[in-house]
Image (cartoon, grey):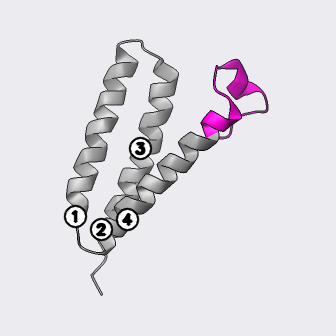
Amino acid sequence: MPVAEGEAERDGMTREHAAAGQAALMLVESLMLALIERGTIPAVELIDAVETVIETKRRIAADGHEPETARLAAGMLATIANSLAAAGTGTPD
């Protein structure tokens, strides 16, 4: 979800922090996909790990600790879980 100019700064996050978070998320997803494609770790195991984090973020939101941030993070993680599931349905070379 795009952030309007200055919005991140008002929420206490600098552009550098947002960029670092995006880079980290993309890197982890890329590494997970590479592990699946190489047959190192079954997709279902990585999906289970991501779903555990999603559940944790939902609990954090329910407890009232930065609920909007936790909700957004859970949505991003769900996208990654879907990406991993799609990669796991392919056949190895």
Q: Nearer the viewer, mark 3 or mark 1?
A: 1
The residue under label 1 is which amino acid type? Ile
Check the image and name the residue furthest to the right: 5
Q: Residue at x 41, y 52 (%)?
A: 80
Q: Which residue is mark 4?
A: 33
Of the two numbered discs 3 and 1 on the same chain, state the one appearing first in sequence: 1
Distance Cα–Cα, label 1 vs label 2: 6 Å
Q: Which residue is mark 2?
A: 36
Q: Picture coordinates of residue 13 (x, y %)?
A: 63, 26
Dot 4 and dot 1 residues touching (CB under 8 Å): no
Check the image and name the residue furthest to the top: 64
Dot 4 and dot 2 residues touching (CB under 8 Å): yes
Distance Cα–Cα, label 4 vs label 1: 10 Å
Q: Picture coordinates of residue 63 (x, y %)?
A: 35, 13
Q: Which residue is mark 3?
A: 77
Of the two numbered discs 4 and 1 on the same chain, state the one appearing first in sequence: 4
Dot 1 and dot 2 residues touching (CB under 8 Å): yes
